[in-house]
Structure formats: structure tokens, C-alpha cells
Image (spheres, rainbow, N blue to C red):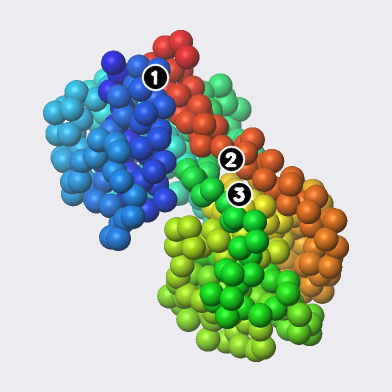
Amino acid sequence: MIRVLLINQDKIPHYRVPIYGYLGKFLLNFGFEFMVASNGIQAGNPHPIEFQHSEINLSVLSLVRLISKWQIDVIIFWVNMKHLYLLPTCLIAKVLLRKKIIYWGHGRDLADVKAKIKNLVYAVQQALSDSIILYAEHLKKYLPRCIQGKVFVANNTLYLSYPGLPPGDREKVLKEYHIHTNKNIICVGRMQKRKRLNHLAAAFESMNRPDIGLILVGPDPERILDKMNGNNIYKLGPIYGEKKFDLLSAADVCCLPGAVGLSIVDAFYCGLPLVTEDGDESPEIGYLRDGENGFIVSKGNILEMTQKLLLLIDNDALRLRFSKEAKTEIEKNGNINQLCSGFKDALCFATRQSG
């Protein structure tokens, strides 16, 4: 059995807990024993912890001790550059301890792909790595050709088990949140400036349609929603678990102008077409096929966003077709087994095992 340690920077977020549990069981079938080290798990975690986990104060010394204690063979780093223990731990594990190491991430700082120093450090880490796992296929373009042979893709996704909204429950869900509009646009996630929700607010206002509502779900740490007021705007705050998916399933279209992230997985899983703006290099944007399961409009073009949203809201046949394509995309490319297969292939390559 080959022992694998994944170093998770900071605390493990809620959504990663079921992923790690499933990944551990998946890899066990191929001879890999999976463990995770982190600073802990995000408070309020609702999921059972079904993987080996060590909560430690992440540092070079603590990690080297753990690697030796657990007799680790392969270390996967999910750690960004702000953590100063990253490179020293990579070097010690690779050069002194003779362990296999794997990089997992975006490949570059997607917020600033021209950040020379930061991306140089990433390049050093990737050169040291025995294999590289990227969040999406299109991110390969940021890596030099000479290392493409050791690059594998594990599409960034979620492990979801929501059974779907029972037929006839749509009105019941909307009534629970006092939503009285016939058609609804929904935006789910942490409300942040980088998501350009002001563009969504402007598009919604320009519609001037009393039959259309705007549902906003998620925490608002930056007080973005203070400026989003008007008729038929429903600010529901944080909603998690099946209730969140019930709301998504009861809505008609999802819109997130910027920083789409994993929200697209939630939306597509529930069959919602998504409208967003261009200009972001989110790994998860690879799930969106413009004109097939959603639309990508020009950044800041409020008129275009309004037109695409109204097209999907008013054209039931088109929305249904986009909905089916959204579900198919996630079932095929956003399936948790796709992510796990990427990890398995990278581990087999690094350890010269047959998969």
C-alpha cells in the first residue's frame, strides 16, 4: 500500500470534507492509502469525516515529523504561495527524504497571470514535482511544454448527493421564502465585490418586469447587498444543504457576473442555465459552453446581460434545452469520479504504478 498525504492549507472548507472522503475510498481501490493534514476543519462542518485526518499547526517541522511518523510515500500540496513553509517542505521532502511530490492547483495565480515572482515560485515547485494536477484542461496553457507530460487534470467539482426537488414542490419552496414572482433569477454564493453583482442589479432593474424576481442567497461580508434594493429582490442570506438546492431547483436562471467558481456546479447540477461575463479565468468556467448551457456576455455590458437573461426566462423551450445540457455537462465532466481519476492517474505516474 502506497501512503499518500495531502497537505490542505489552512482549515479544510466544508465542501472539501465529502470530496476527501470519497477520494480516499476511490484511491484505496488502486493501492493508495489517503490521508490529509491541515490546521483543522472549518467550524460548523455538517459532513461526516470519512478520511484519515491530522490536525496540526502547519509548519516545516510539523510536516516533516508527520511525513516520517506516518511513513508517507507521496505528498500532494494544495498550498498557495502565502504559506512560507511550502517551498522548504517541498525541497526537504524531495531532496532529503526522497519522497514523491505532487502539485495540485491552478498552475498560476489566475488573478494575476503576469505576476513574475509568484509564478516563478510556482514554476520551481512544479519543476520539483513528480506530477502535476490541474483544476481544468484549459489551464495547461500556462505551463511550459517541457512539463506537459507530467500534467493531469482533475476537474474541480463537488461531491453532491441532492436527490432533486420532488415534482410539484416548486411553488411550496418559493412560498416558504415569500417569493411571489412567476420567473426568478438566482445568484448563490458569498456576496463579494469581485463578483460584480452591481452589474446583475443594473440588468435586473433595466428589465422593469414585475413578474421576474431576483433571489440572492449567501453571506454578505462586504455589505454588497446594502446597495441592491428594489421590488422583487429577495435577500435570503446564507442557506446551506438541501434547502439551498431546493431554491436553485425552484428558480429558472442563474446569474453570476464574475468569479463563477464552484457555484456553476451547484447551478448546473440543478439544471439551471448560467449567465456570466467574460474576463475571468476561473477553472470552473470550462463547464460553460456559450450558447449551449449558458451565455458569456461582454464584461460590463448590461444591455447584453439583460437580453440574454430575458431570452432564457421568456423562451421556455430554449431554457429547457439549456437545462438538459447543463445537467449533462456536470454528469459527464463534473462527476466526482472525473476528479478522482485525475488524482489516480497523477499518483500512478509519480509512483510508476499501473492504473
137 sits left or right of 84 in the view:
right
Q: Which tag, 1 or 3, sits closer to the chain's start?
A: 1
- Whole-angstrom CA distance, mark 1 to mark 2, is 21 Å
Residue 23 is left or right of residue 320, and the answer is left
Q: Is residue 30 above or below residue 318?
A: above
The image shows residue 77 at horizontal and vertical percentages of 36, 37
State the separation of the CA atoms marked 1 and 3: 27 Å
Front tag of 3 and 2? 3
Does label 1 or label 2 sit earlier along the sequence? 1
Residues at circles 1 and 2 in contact by the CB criterion of under 8 Å: no
Secondary structure state at the residue bearing disc 1: loop
Q: Which residue is mark 2?
A: 334
Tag 3: amino acid: Tyr
Q: Determine whether the residue tagged by mark 3 lies in a helix, strand or loop.
A: helix
Specify the amino acid type for callout 1.
Answer: Asn
When asked about the image quadrant of residue 350, the answer is top left
Q: Nearer the viewer, residue 308 or 127?
A: 308
Image quadrant in which the N terminus is located: top left
Q: Which residue does the image show at 77% across and 63% down from the upper left? A: 298
Residue matched to label 3: 269
Which of these two is toward me, 239 or 115?
239
Residue 38: x, y in percent? 26, 46
Mark carried by residue 46: none
Name the residue rendered at 75%, 55% in the picture.
294
Residue highlighted by disc 1: 29
Whether the residues at callouts 1 and 3 have beta carbons within 8 Å, the answer is no
Please give left or right for residue 15 compared with residue 65 in the image.
right
